[in-house]
Structures are given as structure tokens and as C-alpha cells.
Amino acid sequence: MGDHFRNARFMTGTDDVLLVHGGTPLEGEIRVRGAKNLVPKAMVAALLGSEPSRLRNVPDIRDVRVVRGLLQLHGVTVRPGEEPGELVLDPTYVESANVADIDAHAGSSRIPILFCGPLLHRLGHAFIPGLGGCDIGGRPIDFHFDVLRQFGATIEKRADGQYLEAPQRLRGTKIRLPYPSVGSTEQVLLTAVLAEGVTELTNAAVEPEIEDLICVLQKMGAIISMDTDRTIRITGVDKLGGYTHRALPDRLEAASWASAALATEGDIYVRGAQQRSMMTFLNTYRKVGGAFEIDDEGIRFWHPGGRLKSIALETDVHPGFQTDWQQPLVVALTQATGLSIVHETVYESRLGFTSALNQMGAHIQLYRECLGGSHCRFGQRNFLHSAVVSGPTKLQGADLVIPDLRGGFSYLIAALAAQGTSRVHGIDLINRGYENFMRSSRSS
């Protein structure tokens, strides 16, 4: 990958535990590959085609391996392409898969739910395992099934999961999302493109990764239009071909490294980062006091010296400040002067990771009230979804257990910014979204 940091071996360890030796500015270069929130979905889209597809800029992360295994179970041939990070997916011989095999490969991933539409079109039936239940919650999964019923699918709940059938060709429909959910928007897109007639989706998610998925589907022969009012219209076609596509770079990973540079008083060049999809983050980064420089190959992020500034921040769906940007930046805000206010409006429990930062010496207080002006689904619902960060505070090394992907990377940033050594447990979660993380962290 060509990734390297000048202060070598700031992380050591074995298996699933990292020893992080903090207190040194993080300096060097990292390359971001294709977005975790696009690549697995583009791989699923290949199921819809009658010809092979070629996907480039694919990261070597766990979600990609899960989808690759599920596609192979269903008869799709997946092989490396001619260049590094390229996959060729051939869906010519799609077949039913063994229930136990699907369950074993799916693990705790949410991706299998997106196989429903393509498999209903290709085979007339699909099976989806339990998907880990509590991790996702019942209502989001139920909403996916409600959408599929509107297209004409029948769904039977069985002991080992959900069995879906399409007695006739699926039909286009009108759907309004109660919230612009990325997963629900993807479900509609992957189902509507081969459904009979027109599908109109209102209050849709419009993230850059959604636009890139639409580009993939259009290359395959789909007819999809996006309006400025979050309305997407899909005219179903009888047949789709393959695609050749280079996935857009991961803006969420790029922002994580940017926050790492800020929190550790470092200087990191993120090769592959793009300005267009990160404009909201870049504005906030500059307000806090971070510096950046953009060229044709990527973005350099660094701490210019002096004091960082406290800010008021609210997360929101695109084009707002992304929830996945929030956790890494909060670590940097512990080093800002004054009181920063963070209002999380996308995920009700995403601020839970701050308890570990407080153990390291941060001063972060959580509140159930909405500390911001934006409309919020969580007001009066007893969720600790607002935070006041008081800084600057000196962080000290600690024992940390990674809770989730972005929270986990935030712990690593905190450990790198802290004095002393931290033991970080559960590092495998980081591999879901950061390619070759262990290798790049040990490079010289």
C-alpha cells in the first residue's frame, strides 16, 4: 500500500490486543481505498447482472470478505482482477445456498438483508438468517421486509430466519422513508431496478456512497434519476448487464486519520482522500483549528500549533456532518480550549464510547437533552445523545475495550495522544473498515 509513519512501531502486540505507545505526534502517509459503505453493496449489485462485473479500488476488509463468501455460496465466481484491489464477479450461474452455510458466513453482518431483492429477481426466492437480532434491533429489519412486501414479495418467518418468495415479477411502488436511512435506500435501489414499472422513493438517503451505487446500477443498464428534494425514481428494466467501476474513496476513514493528526499534534498525508465528499468535515476541521492542504492525489492534514478551538457540532445525514466523523473528532476536541457541545442526531447510543475517554483523563459530560437546534428523533426519549467536552485535558494511557468500528478507531487516537502505554482489546473490529491497519501501524 505504500503506507508509512515516521515514528515507527508506535503500536505493538499480538492477536487481538494492541499495545499503543502514546505521546508522539503521528506523522507520515496513509492510503485510503474504496469506501466500506459502497464496495460491499456494489458487490451485491453484481448479482443483478447477466454478465461479469469488474470492481476496482476494493479494500481488504472483513465486510468485503463476508460478501465475497456469500456471493460464492450463491454460485457467483469471484476472482482477483489484473490490478491490486480489483475483483471480477461472474453471476452467470446463480443458485440457492445452504441455510447453515449462509448463517455461518453472515455472522453479525447486516449485508445479507441486501441480497433479498437481487435473489428474488434471479431465483424467485431468498433466505435471510437472524442477523444477530439485538445488534441491529427489530424495527430496521422489519422495515426492510415491509419494503419488499410492497414490491410483491411474500415473507415467511421460520426458526432459522426469514424465507422470501416472489410468486410473480416484483412490481414498482411508491415508498416514503420515515428517516433517510442509507440501508433502506440501498434496499429499494437493488430491488426496484428489475421490478416492473416505476418506483418512487421519497425522503431517500443521498450520501456520496448512494450516488456511487446509482452510478454502478446505471452502468449495468438501470434507469435512475435523483431530484434535489431527496426523491429517487427508478424505472424498472427487463435485464441488466455487468459493470466496470472504480469505487469512490472512503471519506469516513480519511476523516479518522485527519482527526488522528489533530489529536496527536501530527501531520498525515491521506492519499486518495477527496475534497468534494468531505467539504462539511473540512469546514469543521478548520473551525477547530486544524490545517489541511488539497492536491490531486489526496489531502494533507496537520496540527499547525497553538490552541485548538472549541465548537458546537450537530451530526446529521448527508450533506450534514456525518455521524461516523463524530467519534474521532471528539477525541481531538478533548484537546481544544473551552467547552465543545456535540449533539448526536443519527445514532442514539453513539456517545457511549466517551466513558473510556473520561477514564483516560478527559472531561466529557453526557446529557439526555438535545443540546442543539436541529430536529432530533431522540428528544424526550431518555437517550444520552448530547455531550459537553471540556478541554484541554491531558490523556493518560489505559486499558481499553473497543466497542465498535468508529468508536474503536477513536480509542486508538486517544491512546496515541495519551502519555504512556495503553492496552487496546478487540482490535479485530477495526479491520472491518481499515485495510491492513496493523501493517500500516508498524511501518517505518
Image (cartoon, grey):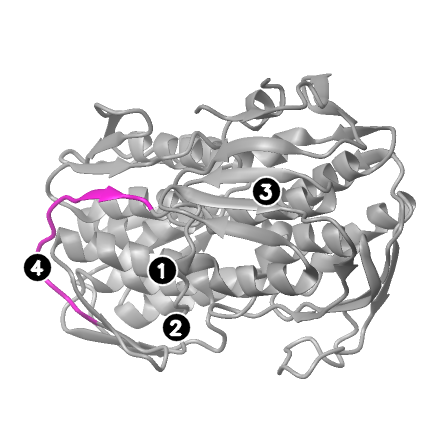
The residue that label 2 is drawn on is: 204
Question: x%, y% of residue 372?
Answer: 71, 79
Would you place residue 214 above or below residue 54 in this image?
A: below
Disc number placed over residue 210 in the picture, else none: 1
Q: What's the CA distance linking mark 3 and mark 2?
A: 29 Å
Q: Position of residue 43 (x, y in %)?
A: 30, 42
Viewed as shown, does residue 360 lie left or right of 247?
right
SS label for mark 2: loop
Disc 4, disc 2: CB below 8 Å? no
Q: Nearer the viewer, mark 4 or mark 1?
A: 1
Magenta includes 246?
Answer: yes
Say which amino acid is labelled 1: Ile
- The magenta span reads 234-247
Residue 108 lies in quadrant: top right
The reply to whether residue 43 is in sight is yes
Q: How far apart in space, not on screen, are marks 4 and 2 (Cα)? A: 24 Å
Q: Residue under circle 3?
A: 257
Badge 3 element: helix
**290 up-or-down from 204: above or below:** above
